[in-house]
């Protein structure tokens, strides 16, 4: 099953403004989402960054048609109500849609042609290739910036197969990964991945982490 993740980011000047948006989301946005056919769930994440608090909202949908029922004909246009605009210092006018293959694509002892699998998809795409014990091996095809985030309980591993991946680390130098180079990011570390062109990566992380395209 293919799931569409719809990602939107905004910036609040401080915790008071971020709290106000979170309340607006809980009381107005989420009920509207839950009344829309094809809506599968939503997460709201807050990360402190230079200049304020970054807010990231990721909603999950059954199809682009379901998203259109919520957002209108221009599905890439962000839906930002006046109440949200009043408490945010900056917000994206457009959203990013990420195709997520829900479930495991390959089984044990099954040959996985990773370059061929990556070539079949355009950015942004993310799927679980296979599970190994308590971890999953994921394939990502990306182009552009992801948002600042962290995982409280899980480490992450990134291996670049094609292109170049930049891993920004809060309070530290950016790590640049070229083809066949890799690094791990420990749990609790705030980070952001970026790609200046089409980049194919393999990720290893705990099976319980919900994929959002990073």
Image: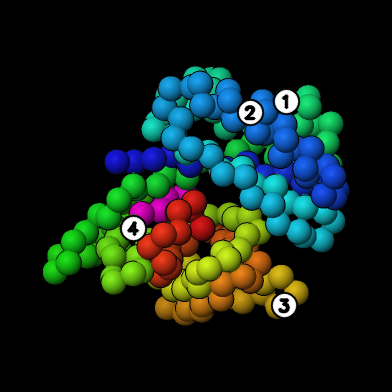
- Counting other residues with Cα less than 10 Å from the Cα at mark 1, is it few (<14), some (14-19), or many (20 or more)? few
Of labels 2 and 4, earlier in sequence is 2
Is 59 left, or right, of 3 in this rendering? right
Q: Give the secondary structure at mark 3.
A: loop
- Counting other residues with Cα less than 10 Å from the Cα at mark 4, is it few (<14), some (14-19), or many (20 or more)? many
How is this picture coloured?
A: rainbow
Any mark on residue 81, and which? 1
Q: Are marks 1 and 3 in contact (CB under 8 Å)?
A: no
- Residue for point 25% across, 54% down: 105
* Viewer-side residue, 105 vs 94: 105
Q: Which residues are magenta?
A: 123-127
Of labels 2 and 3, earlier in sequence is 2
Query: How far across and how far down the image is residue 204, in percent?
Result: 41, 70
Q: CA distance from mark 4 to mark 1?
A: 35 Å
Of labels 2 and 1, earlier in sequence is 2
Quadrant where the N terminus sits is top left
């Amino acid at each position: 099953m293919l799931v569409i993740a719809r990602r939107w980011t905004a910036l609040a000047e401080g915790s008071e403004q971020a709290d106000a948006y979170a309340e607006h989301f809980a009381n107005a946005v989420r009920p509207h989402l839950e009344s829309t056919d094809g809506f599968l769930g939503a997460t709201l994440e807050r990360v402190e960054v230079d200049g304020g608090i970054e807010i990231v909202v990721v909603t999950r949908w059954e199809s682009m048609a379901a998203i259109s029922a919520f957002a209108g004909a221009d599905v890439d246009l962000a839906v930002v109500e006046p109440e949200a605009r009043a408490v945010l210092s900056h917000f994206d006018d457009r959203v990013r849609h990420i195709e997520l293959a829900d479930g495991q694509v390959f089984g044990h002892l099954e040959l996985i042609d990773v370059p061929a699998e990556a070539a079949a998809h355009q950015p942004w795409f993310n799927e679980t290739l296979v599970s190994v014990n308590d971890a999953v091996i994921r394939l990502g095809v990306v182009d552009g910036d992801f948002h600042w985030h962290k995982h409280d309980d899980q480490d992450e591993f990134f291996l670049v197969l094609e292109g170049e991946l930049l891993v920004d680390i809060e309070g530290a130098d950016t790590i640049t990964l070229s083809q066949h180079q890799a690094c791990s990011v420990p749990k609790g570390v705030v980070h952001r991945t970026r790609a200046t062109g089409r980049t194919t990566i393999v990720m290893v992380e705990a099976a319980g982490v919900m994929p959002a395209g990073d």
